Each structure stands twice: as C-alpha cells, then as structure tokens.
Image (cartoon, rainbow, N blue to C red):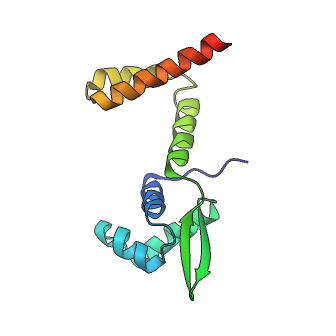
Amino acid sequence: MSKKTIGDQELALLQYIEEAPKSSVAEVCAGYGEARGLARSTVLTMMERLRAKGYLTRRRIDGSFRYSATNGAAEVMTGAVARFVEKTLQGSVSPFVAWMSERGQVSDAELAELEALVGTLQSRRKGR
C-alpha cells in the first residue's frame, strides 16, 4: 500500500527533519517553525500528520519524543513526481521536457544529470 501524499509545507518539514534526525518538537519549532512564522501547535500538528501518514517515526528518548524520517525526502519527491506524471500528465513526460526546454534555465549540472539519465534509459532499452 502506498503512503498518502504530502503537501509542499509538509515536504519542506520532512526535509528539515531528515537533515536533523532525532529532533524534538521544540528543536523543530526553533529551527524550522520560527523562520516561517509557524506556531508550535502548527509544527506539532504537521509532524503528527507526517507520522500518521508513515513519513516520520517518534521515539521517547530521555523523557521527550524525538522524530526521525522513515524514508529519505528524495524517495518522497520521487513518489510525488511519479504521481504527477501519472495523474496530471497521463503518463507522458513530454510536456515536462517541453516545459524545461522553454524555461531555458537549466544549469550545466542539471543538463549533465539529464544526459546521464537519458544514457541510462538508452542502455536499459538496448538490454531488452
């Protein structure tokens, strides 16, 4: 069974917790919430929603709960992209590639990464 989807704010929070594992709510509020003007209750609600969706775990350590990501944010992002391509683009990546081409702001590093991915796809295809 796949995990429930998450929103942009939840993804940003998940990325923060992934970089600072075993964080308490107070630590996340100070490091993530304050900079975004979020109340402690809002941060706690988001963290508990992510936990309910299976993206965070919670363990009691030295009397306080500590939260850690169950999966990497990159895996969550991959799932979000897959859902977007399947649902919004009806399985075709062509509109996305066209958008990237029109945008014209692809860095040299991004272009190299895309070329490597295309090379991998071509190798897999030849291997069939």
Residue 62 in view of the camera:
yes
The residue closer to the viewer here, 93 or 71, is 71
At horizontal 63% and vertical 65% (from top left) the residue drawn is 52
Relative placement, left or right, of 86 versus 110 is right
The answer to whether residue 106 is seen in the rendering is no
Toward the top, the furthest residue is 126
On screen, residue 64 versus residue 128, left or right, reads: left
The picture places residue 101, in percent across and down from the top left corner, at: 33, 20
Q: How far from the left and from the top, in percent, is residue 72? A: 53, 52
* Image point (58%, 31%), residue name: 86
In the picture, measured across the screen, residue 94 lies left or right of residue 123, that is left
Q: Quadrant of residue 113?
A: top left
Depicted 63 relative to depicted 43: above or below? below
Residue 29: name its quadrant: bottom left
What is the count of numbered marks? 0
Give the residue at x 54% y 48%. Answer: 76
Q: Position of residue 71 (x, y in %)?
A: 58, 54
**Quadrant the C terminus occupies:** top right
